[in-house]
Image (cartoon, rainbow, N blue to C red):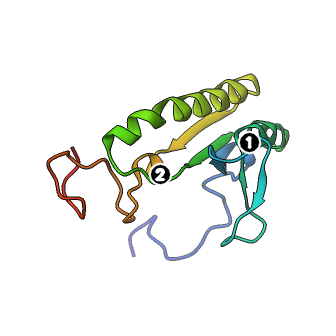
Amino acid sequence: MRAGLSRRLTENAQVTVSPENFLQALDVDITADPHSVKAHRSIPGYESLGIGAAAERLDAVAGLGIKGVAVRVIDRPVSGREEWRGRRDPWVSAIGTLVEEAAARHLTVVVDPFSAALQPTGQWGLLSDLEPADGGTLG
């Protein structure tokens, strides 16, 4: 075997695992009461938070030395572009609030946009106005 090539595991860590390497996931329900904290149906010990409760949770994240949060915004499905146009302002406001609160605590915010255009069928994306309601391409 050539020098430096081995199948042995080494005890020397290549990466130091510490809180500043992680983000805490937060499900933020913008349809809920701002101070709402609801147990998640599918994940024991995990909660969906109203925007105010999420902002308060940032104190715990900062206290643990975690780098920041990954936010999944929870909203109702949209049926099309016109409905989404009416939802942009609440999304921008909610995310803006979290970014301001996080910045005050020196935390990073990453937003998962998956539910931004969730269709009632479970598809993701705003469909072109010319596409059939049961499928099509993004507009």
**In this picture, residue 128 sits left or right of residue 16:** left
Q: In which quarter of the image is the C terminus?
A: top left
Q: Closer to the camera, 19 or 40?
A: 40
Instruction: Report x, y in % for residue 63.
Output: 85, 39
- Residue 67 visible in rendering: yes
Q: Is residue 92 above or below residue 136?
A: above
Q: Disc 1 designates what residue?
A: 54
Amino acid type, label 1: Ala
Q: Disc 2 designates what residue?
A: 115
Q: Distance between the residues labelled 2 and 1?
A: 17 Å
Instruction: Report x, y in % for residue 26.
Output: 67, 50
Q: Is residue 121 above or below residue 110?
A: below
Instruction: Report x, y in % for residue 37.
Output: 79, 53
Asked if disc 2 and disc 1 are in contact, CB closer than 8 Å, the reply is: no
Q: Closer to the camera, 20 or 49?
A: 49
Badge 2 marks a residue whose secondary structure is: helix
> What residue sits 50% from the left and 76% below the top?
7
Q: Closer to the camera, 63 or 122?
A: 122
Mark 2 crowd level (few <14, some 14–19, many ≥20, 10 Å Cα): some
> What residue sits 66% from the left and 28% below the top?
97
Q: How many marks?
A: 2
Amino acid type, label 2: Ser
Instruction: Report x, y in % for residue 12.
Output: 66, 60
Mark 1 crowd level (few <14, some 14–19, many ≥20, 10 Å Cα): many
Of pointers 2 and 1, the one earlier in the residue sequence = 1
Residue 18 badge: none
> What residue sits 60% from the left and 46% below the top?
70
> What residue sits 76% from the left and 37% below the top?
52
Q: Closer to the camera, 46 or 15?
A: 46
